Image (cartoon, coloured by chain):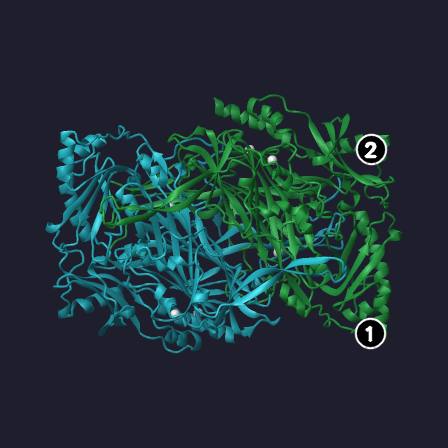
Chain colours: A green, B cyan
Amino acid sequence: SSASKSREYAHHGAPMFADLTVSEMKAVRAYLHEIPEMKLTDARSKSLKKNSILLMELHLPRKHEALRALDRGHAKPPRQARVVIMFGNQIKPNITEYIVGPIPFPNYHEVKTFKGSKPVLFESRPITNVEYAHLENKLEEIATKAQKLIYESTGGFSYTNCTNRCLTFSDIAPRGLAPGQRRTWIMLQKFVEGYFIHPIGFEVLINHQDLDPDKWTVEKVWYNSMYFDSVEELIDKYESGEVEKFQLPVHDDNDLYSTYVPRGQSNTPTNIHGPKLVEPQGHRYHINHNFVEYFGWSFAYRVRSSAGLQVFDLRFNGERIAYEISLQEAIAFYSGDTPAAMQTKYIDAGWAMGSSTYELAPGIDCPEIATFIDLHHFFDTDKPVLHKNALCIFEMTTAMPLRRHFNSNFQGGYNFFGGLENTVLVMRTTSTVYNYDYIWDFLFYQNGVVEVKVSATGYIHATFFTPQGLDYGTKVYNYVLGNLHTHLIHYKVDLDIAGRENSFETLDLKYVNFTNPWSKQNFIVQSKLQRNEHKTERSAAFRFGKKFPRYLHFYNPNDKNKWGHQRGYRIQFNSHAHSVLPKGWKEEVGISWARYPLAVTRHKDSEATSSSIYTQNDPWEPVVSFEDYIRNNEDISNQDLVAWVTVGFLHVPHSEDIPNTATPGNAVGFFLRPFNFFNEDPSLASKSTVIVRPGQDGKPKIQRWTPEVIGHCVTERPFSYNGTYAGV
Amino acid sequence: SSASKSREYAHHGAPMFADLTVSEMKAVRAYLHEIPEMKLTDARSKSLKKNSILLMELHLPRKHEALRALDRGHAKPPRQARVVIMFGNQIKPNITEYIVGPIPFPNYHEVKTFKGSKPVLFESRPITNVEYAHLENKLEEIATKAQKLIYESTGGFSYTNCTNRCLTFSDIAPRGLAPGQRRTWIMLQKFVEGYFIHPIGFEVLINHQDLDPDKWTVEKVWYNSMYFDSVEELIDKYESGEVEKFQLPVHDDNDLYSTYVPRGQSNTPTNIHGPKLVEPQGHRYHINHNFVEYFGWSFAYRVRSSAGLQVFDLRFNGERIAYEISLQEAIAFYSGDTPAAMQTKYIDAGWAMGSSTYELAPGIDCPEIATFIDLHHFFDTDKPVLHKNALCIFEMTTAMPLRRHFNSNFQGGYNFFGGLENTVLVMRTTSTVYNYDYIWDFLFYQNGVVEVKVSATGYIHATFFTPQGLDYGTKVYNYVLGNLHTHLIHYKVDLDIAGRENSFETLDLKYVNFTNPWSKQNFIVQSKLQRNEHKTERSAAFRFGKKFPRYLHFYNPNDKNKWGHQRGYRIQFNSHAHSVLPKGWKEEVGISWARYPLAVTRHKDSEATSSSIYTQNDPWEPVVSFEDYIRNNEDISNQDLVAWVTVGFLHVPHSEDIPNTATPGNAVGFFLRPFNFFNEDPSLASKSTVIVRPGQDGKPKIQRWTPEVIGHCVTERPFSYNGTYAGV
Ligand SMILES: [Ca+2]
Ligand SMILES: [Ca+2]
Ligand SMILES: [Ca+2]
Ligand SMILES: [Ca+2]
Ligand SMILES: [Cu+2]
Ligand SMILES: [Cu+2]
């Protein structure tokens, strides 16, 4: 049958999207290291003036080649790797990306260029472990000079020679004010559990552009709301009394402030376990390597080391709904009164957020019944790194019906009751981008709905409290300001609604006013559907702050459902996002995708991502600029369309963000919902439905397709239902 | 201690909010029936020219009296009932509401008047069982006259003398075009499972204003897109060929279209049970009659027969956050091409939606582990009606951490991992308003967040398909149009943030542009908080379609948290609502609350609800008009404030609404989130936290406050965590 063929092809094609294996990574590294001209050396060796691999990940096949395998069962194209190499050991250092293949026995490498052949500035590279080591040395030097000041200000903390009164630091990005700079504001923090919310009020601007760390310089120091051109200037003025000394409150080791240690009371017990999920009859989903099936769904997944979780070849009952749904970027732009605060514009792909997928804790990060899956990353390393249990897949109940109806007879009885529990498959990873933890979810509902969601938790990025800081946030501790910021997340949604050729329209309502046809002296006002096909990329790029259409409808103009409607899906937003900077203002150029809650482009293999790992450290002239994708304003009618979705929220920290931002209320995302794609709700295929009808004998007759009793761990009582509501 | 006193008082006061018991209802009925002047007779007796009780429910005590009990432990005010009596047996029939007390031994009754002493038109009363019986008689008469036409058009269905080819009907409201009318459009439907989506294309307008059903008249008939002044006219023209005959497609008894019967395939098993919730160590919440405690939370609840679920005296750790949060109204305004469709403006309190709380199915409507609670209603009845298991309360896991952080050491190890699972208490009822099923949820999170949510499911309200209907919806079956409509839900949120005196401000962002303090040739642009206190009711009434503020902040101007910030809560919307009619247009006057996503008023006992059971049948001159509450534009600074919240969504039906609208994506609501109310996240009191630190021996050291192994039904493996991400 065509359904089983479709399933076979989907399964056959899924490995095209699988991340590089350990042996593949090793083979690629070995191949490149054997090329003499590359002069590659270890990433973790101390020098910055060297050539080394920064990042290695799967390079996706071109879509039309992949589709030959997925749609017709043809041979899969050879696997390739994308490798980012830092060439620091040459007169004009640069970053070059290569495509290396075929894997697992590579024999070629080609330079991968960016649109317009833009070169990648060496200064725009992500920061590495080695560069951090040198920065730490520099900080040691600075902190040693300022040792007395720091010690006095903090009541005994120091950066070096410390035991339980140590300091650590956070570095701010972007690293400067213009392309080519590498000047980083760094703030010192007490090195205690939850150090992110322990800034001590000492910030320093280090220029570390030179590849010789001995040439690095301190450009500014900020202390007690004052700026100094050097550590020496600060110390002189501090000693001479020209600078007002300040002192943090006495450090209290018993203050649990930044820790997770429980404190406080509740009226009901929490020292016993709460409700847990069990699967009394086992999993109802299949996982085969990176290929997942659940109910009508099938898809492949991977986790890019650069930007994270991706879903490919998403099908329902064998029909494709999306070729790709993938996380592109996550940013948090801050405001504040200290130089570190006002400089903070985190653009997390630049920190390889896809590789910061750490172990998931069973029962906390995912239910105990989840399937936990290992990931491997190759970023800033000399060998592949195993991230154990870093992805989880599980089915859960939402404790809610998917549909239910009580069909009253309005006489104390009923015609029937029907219901189906709402269960959902969840695929989850996290990215711990230093202080913050993002939880990335894809949810697959039985009725053809997909939910894509990000939840925010972890520590806030906080800076030293100053009274002026209250314009930019909330005091959350004696000396700490929680700085306001906006989280924006960008997703690529390459919908292929039952095929590649799709169109896009929006639906709005408009009042119509006409004579009442059954009472001519009266008028009727009612809402009428206004369909508006958006035929060009510009007309389908919606700006924040402008009117946003009610329904966003992607459909196949060449395919209709049983009732004559174009088969489609719509995107429904769940977001509180808004612009973070005026259009075109400096760093805003680097995040031009963030202008649009939704933009629709014509698919191009060369427009694979909306951001890059280089935007963080050069947002001013980014090598990947989303605006370029819509600038040519292509026709998007009956084309292969890609929807680009921005979600997010304003976060004004408050006392309840201590110790961490909590997930309730801090989740945003979007739904993909069928809109005349099927002929009826496809969850009708579920055998978990229960129907109750009054029997001849007056007793309820229960019709179901699942075992009556589930097992003694869950309940020994069979399902029961009465249906009457009787006078008493 | 003050905390235990607070708990004692809360518990003491909760019965003030408990719904009437069966014996209380019986006592009130008996008391009123014994008053000769009332001339009360049975509600279910056949006549319409009679005096009878329509509805009886608890009448809430005045707030300042209730607070004496809740805050100081004083005696509770006597319980009272609100009784709605229909006086049909008099020259000028009317509706009068009475307050009857004291309960359970009533000895007084007082007329309860509406603002401005507006009388309640008899024609605005909800429809009753008896009136339906007469309407059915009338329909029988009509259908008998048109028997041949109906039989031919439907391929064998008839309204009378039928066995398995019967018809039923749906009646539309409002019932006319102006106050004092009672003219109802009724549409015939096949009486099969899911008859709501089987309109046969025969609609009739019956004038049933007269209390003598013999005087009821047919005013219009609609058949095959044509209007007729009488059944006779239709029949004549049908027989003479002046009317084009139409025929429904042949009825197929095996077409499962409108049923719940499973059909179709899925790739993974659904004939076994999916994941289920268990409570291996029992409930972690307490329920004592209508008083509920969970974690720091306590509250009382009731379910008004008129409008549904209400929460009272909501406290966290003994401090009040809200005096009342309650459902007020749910409307669905439709568009369409048939007279029934264009007339449909359902205003569900007028159908006593609070009393349509039918039995909840374990495992479908609520998890099997839920506590199921009976409700009693007294609406259109002669004795209290038991609604078994109509409310449920349960704790669930969201399968998500409330907070988590992996604190990497960036060297393949970690400083610590911490996490707390997100569990939540859910209180749920449903309202089956004829075809639709609303699921009403209150969710109480451990971090002081409350979520109020409505999910929509059940059958769509569908009308007969005509080609012009496509301007107003989607064809979902051979001869059926799913009509577009908007759901709007109104909530009263009487926040009392740590006391009655509260203020309201909104927070927005504004760009500021200034010289970079550490690089004078550059400028910084960043967002600054703009606080705007709204001091009057008008300024705090936000219109749909206008700019809506980012943060809505209710705070106690007389109380600060530890860090000097006003203690507050904010409302966060999760909604896609919009206006349904131009302001002031006919029926819009009856739902003036629907103009505002948020309005803030000064609390008044006399402004208890924003709608009434009379609005449905007289939306043109409603006795309760929300606009009246803000018209006097009172000062709302440092006052007892009430927030009125409208949420909702546009529903353009689509094929996947067959057989029912599904809940995924069809939920809207709002969060109440602490904003500097606490000094830190109150969920820190949970002992379910897990902290993992690397031990001296290199092995993870797990710190927890709950048993390691939960029980063999859940998992026999103790919690484990590794934390390293090692090169391989
Ligand atoms: Ca383009
Ligand atoms: Ca596409
Ligand atoms: Ca007022
Ligand atoms: Ca209040
Ligand atoms: Cu945040
Ligand atoms: Cu609806």
In which quadrant is the C terminus of chain A drawn?
bottom left
User: Which residue occupies the foreground of this view, A476 or A342?
Assistant: A342
User: Which residue occupies the foreground of this view, B63 or B480?
Assistant: B480
Residue drawn 40% across the image and 38% down it: B654
| Residue labelled 1 has its Cβ within 8 Å of some atom of ligand 5 | no
Q: Residue A86 at x, y = what percent?
A: 80, 40
> Identity of the amino acid at label 2?
His
Image quadrant of residue B660?
Answer: top left
Mark 2, secondary structure of its residue: helix
Q: Residue B223 at x, y = what percent?
A: 22, 37
Q: Is residue A319 left or right of residue B474?
A: right
Q: Counting other residues with Cα less than 10 Å from the Cα at mark 2, is it few (<14), some (14-19), or many (20 or more)?
A: some
Q: Is residue B437 left or right of residue A128?
A: left
Q: Residue furthest left?
A: B214
Dot in front, 1 or 2: 1
Marked residue chain, label 2: A
| Residue labelled 2 has its Cβ within 8 Å of some atom of ligand 2 | no
User: Which residue occupies the foreground of this view, A474 or A681?
Assistant: A474
In this picture, is A612 found above or below B328? above
Same subunit: marks 1 and 2: yes
Ligand 1's image quarter is: top right
Q: Is residue A541 left or right of residue A482?
A: left
Q: Is residue B449 visible?
A: yes
In this picture, is A536 found above or below A46? above
* Residue behind mark 1: A242
Image quadrant of residue B49?
Answer: bottom left
Q: CA distance from mark 1 to mark 2?
A: 56 Å
Q: Counting other residues with Cα less than 10 Å from the Cα at mark 1, is it few (<14), some (14-19), or many (20 or more)?
A: few
* Residue behind mark 2: A33
> Identity of the amino acid at label 1?
Glu
Residue drawn 30% across the image and 65% down it: B20
